[in-house]
């Protein structure tokens, strides 16, 4: 699946002005952004003309370093940030100027943002209370959603009495009860400890699959993005660097930024060309018929099944090779040792050039 | 090496001395004096219950308390409304730091002038020949000057509101500023209108601030006699005014008894309020 980031929305949405999809329109994308920009007080653009189409019921991660515009992009989808220029469409409806609650999205905040004066149950029931749903009914429905996130036992606790992971589950239930078409998650796992992070990660994926709606998840963790995503959008300096499946982004990074940011790649200038080679395809023995570079080992990190070897070339370029522990311990090299860093030409990726 | 026990006693000593010398001893003396007889400008050190029985026998005590409670209630209601509105505007609607600084200065600068001067400066505004009456007659809205603008309960309440509104704005703005912006956004995301954000999220979360402001306002109104006398032209009588009158007449024992009653009433009010609202939340963060 190749996601085209340059497209004309008019081909897809015949009648965006009316707000509703025209009769017979096939809804192929849950979220579309058309040349969307954001600038604050006429200054530099935090988000610079990004166009993006997220297919139906997909788990999409916006990945990038801090300040790259990924959170601003999410907040523009949510309606918590005005769009300076461009259009935002959700389920083929132009929602650029709609209120946060009127666009079929729901947002899960980084800090969870639970209402501190309400119990977990009342937090989840909040949107129903606003709609004047009778108390017994709204509490029963809130309980269903607390069950979905396995929090029914703690329904009557106040947020201050819940751990970070528990608060997050309540926040998720509170977002889902509004029956959003698209759930927006702002760095949902960054405040959790590593163990809980992996647990919640699979939980999020389970719930997304179960509900069959689109999740847009902002993260700065490559590991998280690769593990969760149907679609990874790598951003830098307010622009989309690459959008594609996790495998595409990892195996065929579209430029050196993506290759470096996604991790596990060596970006090497070799014989006048810049190529990227996955670190796990590199070796520290001379390769017959391969590319060979003299290098010195600077550090060795044992990671269980894998061993990561950091090296530096004679012209001070950092390199990295990841090899299996069996291969490593068959003939363990030492820090400071001069070795030959090598890879096979087939494993080179020349950034689509 | 000092034992931890001795160290804590030592640490508590300075404050204990201040509390004893400046609070407990004077209060005990007032309490003792309230049980003494008095003559013209003298205290007769004999046990006498008349100071106390007089308070509970006279209708005057009930009338003065009715007056001051009514005043406190009105002033509280108006300052709460003003305080909430001003704080809400400052916290949620003033976006630029420049304007925020201007507004804060506008709130703070009047305090550079002393309280009595700010109070007395209402006289030329509200008097029979004052600016308000002149303006109203000049606009032909009234035929003759309104007489109840000054030296009335009206002027007392107006000046109280003028003097005390900032005491309500401060604590409310303080607890409002502590509400995480994400919580307000979450409420919007859930579909709350601006009014629902106020009633469902902001008001429940600023209750401690409202309680602190309420304590400031009510204790100030209950305890003040000076402003009432000046602005009512000695026409409005409150418990504090009654105490001041007796002190001026050197009748210290009945003044002492009335002071104890006033103190108990105010402390009971604060005690009840503290039971209803957890102020520690406000002080803790």
Image: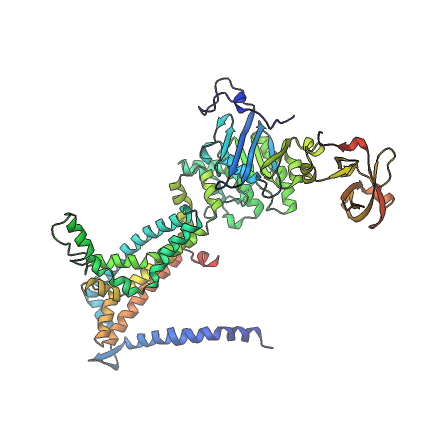
Residue A106 in view, yes or no = no
Q: Is residue B214 above or below residue A290?
A: below
Residue lying farthest to the top in this orientation: A24
Q: Is residue A61 above or below residue B199?
A: above
Residue found at x 86% / y 36%: A287
Q: Quadrant of residue A47?
A: top right
Q: Is residue A244 left or right of B76 when viewed as pictured?
A: right
Q: Is residue B250 left or right of A187 when viewed as pictured?
A: left
Q: Is residue A113 above or below residue B130?
A: above
Residue found at x 19% / y 80%: B40
How many numbered discs, if any? 0
Residue lying farthest to the front in this orientation: A272
- The quarter of the rendered structure image containing the N terminus of chain B is bottom right
Q: Is residue A305 left or right of A56 when viewed as pictured?
A: right
* Foreground pick, B147 / A147: B147
Q: Is residue A249 left or right of B49 when viewed as pictured?
A: right
Q: Position of residue B238 (x, y in %)?
A: 23, 64
Colouring of the image: rainbow
Q: Position of residue B204 (x, y in %)?
A: 41, 48
* Foreground pick, A3 / A7: A7
* Foreground pick, A33 / A21: A33
Residue A254 in view, yes or no = yes
Q: Quadrant of residue B162?
A: bottom left
Q: Position of residue B129 (x, y in %)?
A: 16, 58
Q: Is residue A181 above or below residue B133?
A: above
Residue lying farthest to the left in this orientation: B143
Residue found at x 21% / y 60%: B124
Q: Position of residue B160 (x, y in %)?
A: 28, 59
């Amino acid at each position: 699946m190749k996601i085209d980031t340059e497209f004309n929305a008019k081909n897809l949405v015949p009648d965006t002005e009316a707000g509703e999809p025209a009769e017979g329109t096939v809804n192929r994308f849950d979220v579309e952004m058309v040349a969307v920009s954001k600038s604050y007080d006429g200054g530099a653009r935090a988000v610079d003309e990004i166009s993006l189409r997220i297919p139906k019921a997909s788990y999409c991660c916006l990945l990038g370093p801090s300040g790259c515009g990924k959170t601003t992009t999410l907040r523009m989808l949510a309606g918590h940030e005005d769009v300076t220029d461009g259009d935002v469409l959700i389920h083929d409806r132009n929602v650029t100027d709609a209120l946060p609650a009127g666009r079929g999205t729901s947002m899960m905040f980084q800090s969870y943002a639970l209402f501190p004066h309400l119990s977990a149950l009342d937090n989840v029931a909040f949107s129903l209370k606003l709609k004047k749903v009778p108390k017994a009914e709204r509490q029963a429905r809130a309980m269903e959603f607390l069950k979905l996130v396995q929090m029914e036992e703690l329904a009557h606790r106040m947020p201050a009495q819940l751990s970070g992971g528990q608060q997050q589950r309540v926040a998720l239930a509170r977002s889902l009860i509004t029956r959003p078409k698209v759930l927006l998650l702002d760095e949902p796992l960054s405040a959790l400890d590593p163990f809980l992070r992996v647990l919640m990660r699979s939980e999020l994926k389970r719930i997304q699959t179960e509900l069959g709606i689109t999740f847009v998840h902002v993260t700065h963790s490559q590991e998280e993005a690769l593990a969760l995503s149907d679609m990874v959008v790598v951003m830098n300096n307010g622009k989309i660097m690459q959008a594609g499946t996790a495998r595409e982004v990892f195996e065929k990074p579209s430029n050196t930024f993506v290759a470096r940011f996604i991790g596990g790649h060596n970006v090497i200038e070799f014989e006048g060309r810049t190529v990227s080679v996955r670190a796990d395809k590199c070796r520290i023995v001379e390769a017959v018929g391969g590319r060979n570079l003299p290098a010195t080992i600077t550090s060795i990190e044992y990671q269980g099944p894998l061993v990561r070897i950091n090296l530096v070339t004679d012209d001070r370029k950092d390199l990295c090779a990841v090899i299996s522990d069996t291969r490593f311990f068959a003939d363990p090299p030492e820090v400071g040792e001069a070795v030959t860093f090598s890879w096979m030409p087939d494993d080179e990726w020349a950034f689509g050039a | 090496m000092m034992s931890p026990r001795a160290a804590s006693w030592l640490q508590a000593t300075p404050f204990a001395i201040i509390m004893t010398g400046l609070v407990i001893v004077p209060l005990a003396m007032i309490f003792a004096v309230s049980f003494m007889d008095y003559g013209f400008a003298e205290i007769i050190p004999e046990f006498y219950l008349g100071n106390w029985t007089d308070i509970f026998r006279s209708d005057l005590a009930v009338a003065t308390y009715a007056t001051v409670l009514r005043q406190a209630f009105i002033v509280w209601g108006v300052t709460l409304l003003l305080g909430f509105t001003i704080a809400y505007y400052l916290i949620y609607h003033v976006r630029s730091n420049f304007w925020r600084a201007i507004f804060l200065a506008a709130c703070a600068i009047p305090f550079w002038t002393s309280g009595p001067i700010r109070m007395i400066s209402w006289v030329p505004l509200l008097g029979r020949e004052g600016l308000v009456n002149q303006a109203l007659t000049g606009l032909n809205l009234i035929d003759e000057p309104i007489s109840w603008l000054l030296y009335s309960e009206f002027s007392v309440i107006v000046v109280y509101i003028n003097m005390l509104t900032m005491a309500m704005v401060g604590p409310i703005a303080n607890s409002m500023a502590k509400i995480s912006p994400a919580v307000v956004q979450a409420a919007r995301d859930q579909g709350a209108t601006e009014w629902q954000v106020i009633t469902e999220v902001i008001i429940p979360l600023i209750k401690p601030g409202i309680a602190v402001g309420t304590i400031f306002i009510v204790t100030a109104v209950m305890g003040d006699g000076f402003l009432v006398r000046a602005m009512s032209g000695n026409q409005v009588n409150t418990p504090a005014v009654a105490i001041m009158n007796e002190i001026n007449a050197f009748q210290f024992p009945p003044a002492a008894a009335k002071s104890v009653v006033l103190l108990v009433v105010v402390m009971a009010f604060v005690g009840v309020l503290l039971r209803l609202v957890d102020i520690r939340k406000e002080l803790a963060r």
